[in-house]
């Protein structure tokens, strides 16, 4: 089991155009090598691994210690893989682009042969992963970026990021479909951040009874719950915002996944139900924060040294040539690249 820390202070600004153009080409070339050698599933597995992702970003020349590493690397991969020729595409992105993910998923049938039922499952997976990290896990980081990696087999990976402007840090969340047994019981492959605090963690195993009680409570008329909220003076609960609770009552969810997907069920409503579960039935939620990389071409800010554009372009060309030769039966360059690790292991 790998453990470690990713330091992600908030950095403002944008990636230089000359570097982003190269990141698209090199990102696609590295992806093509991995897909060719190990398959699409292996690429999804690697990109959802925070250690691989951080190393990948460094190889592409982006700052290892910047929050922008997440948005820029996933953005470069989205551009580089958009044709779908490698059997993988990246959807979503930063800000407004993240909210376009559902409509982009619906268009996947034009790229891959995915059934309508699989398309709907992908939309649910995308929405649930975002809901969990923004509402069911209340750690002080507001989501602003959501990248959804999808293979032509319908498998997926999510890399999304939240920010906390008060402490000037970001937090990155990694998901992998084959590792998700339940969206509401410790579903993450990893959560990366350099700060740790107190969090309402409704996806912890220890919150199981609280999750069940929250579902039971919502089946009662929310207006009957107001009197209990008025008794709890320790926490700030906005009694005016009962839209989500009323919507959930009308829907009558069968489980916690259905509950958090109800329109209007945001952080305040989820928090209210968690506090009510404790107040009325003594079902305590978890308050544990679940948060638990080598430069190859330099970094865009000149640390540890400036990007060498000539070397960067040569690296991209070597990988592209290796793949093209392998396709016609000449695997000599592929084998040579594989042997490089023997000198550095």
Image (spheres, helix red, strand yellow):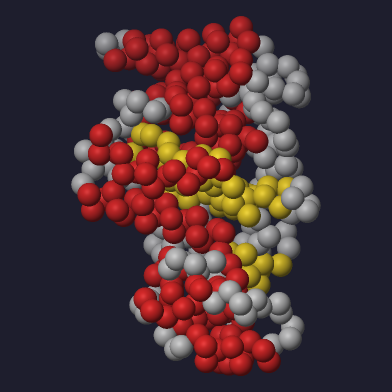
Tell how many labels.
0
Direction front: furthest residue: 240
| Image location of residue 282, percent across then percent down | 59, 90
**Residue 109 position by quadrant:** top left
Most foreground residue, 4 or 276: 276
Residue at 38% from the left image edge and 34% from the top image edge: 89
Q: Quadrant of the C terminus?
A: top right
Q: Would residue 49 be visible to someone looking at this image?
A: no
- Residue 233: x and y in percent read 73, 86
x, y percent for residue 292: 64, 56
Question: In this rendering, would 345 be left or right of 320?
Answer: right
At x 60%, y 71%, the residue is: 268
Look at the picture and state if 336 lies above or below 14: above
Q: What's the residue at 66%, 12% (across, down)?
A: 308
Q: From this viewpoint, which residue is outermost toward the right?
A: 167
- Where is 153 relative to 324, above or below? below
Q: Quadrant of residue 241?
A: bottom right
| 129 to the left or right of 150 | right
Residue that appears at 23% across and 43% down = 114
Residue 108 visible here: yes
- Residue 166 lies left or right of residue 215; in this view the side is right
Vertically, is 286 above or below 149?
Answer: below
Q: Position of residue 211 (x, y in %)?
A: 49, 78
Quarter of the view holding residue 198: bottom right
Q: Nearer the viewer, residue 220 or 295?
A: 220
């Amino acid at each position: 089991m790998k453990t470690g820390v990713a330091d992600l202070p908030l950095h403002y600004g944008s990636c230089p155009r000359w570097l982003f153009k190269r990141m698209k080409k090199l990102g696609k070339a590295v992806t093509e090598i991995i897909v060719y050698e190990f398959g699409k599933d292996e690429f999804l597995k690697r990109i959802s691994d925070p250690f691989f992702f951080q190393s990948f970003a460094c190889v592409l020349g982006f700052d290892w210690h910047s929050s922008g590493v997440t948005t820029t690397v996933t953005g470069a991969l989205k551009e580089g893989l958009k044709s779908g020729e490698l059997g993988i595409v990246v959807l979503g992105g930063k800000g407004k682009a993240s909210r376009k993910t559902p409509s982009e998923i619906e268009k996947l049938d034009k790229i891959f042969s995915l059934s309508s039922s699989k398309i709907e499952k992908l939309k649910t997976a995308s929405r649930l992963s975002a809901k969990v990290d923004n509402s069911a896990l209340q750690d002080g980081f507001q989501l602003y970026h959501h990248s959804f990696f999808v293979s032509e087999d319908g498998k997926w990976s999510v890399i999304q990021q939240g920010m906390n402007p008060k402490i000037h840090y970001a937090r990155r969340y990694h998901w992998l479909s084959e590792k998700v047994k339940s969206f509401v019981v410790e579903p993450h492959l990893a959560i990366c951040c350099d700060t740790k605090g107190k969090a309402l963690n409704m996806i912890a195993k220890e919150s199981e009874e609280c999750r069940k009680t929250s579902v039971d409570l919502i089946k009662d008329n929310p207006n009957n719950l107001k009197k209990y909220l008025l008794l709890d003076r320790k926490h700030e609960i906005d009694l005016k915002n009962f839209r989500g609770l009323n919507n959930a009552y009308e829907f009558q969810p069968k489980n916690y996944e259905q509950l958090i997907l109800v329109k209007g069920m945001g952080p305040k409503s989820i928090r209210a139900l968690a506090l009510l579960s404790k107040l009325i039935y003594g079902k305590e939620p978890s308050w544990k924060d679940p948060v638990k990389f080598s430069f190859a071409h330099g970094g865009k800010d000149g640390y540890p040294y400036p990007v060498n554009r000539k070397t960067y372009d040569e690296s991209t060309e070597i990988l592209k040539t290796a793949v093209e030769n392998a396709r016609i039966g000449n695997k000599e360059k592929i084998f040579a690249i594989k042997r490089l690790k023997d000198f550095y292991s």
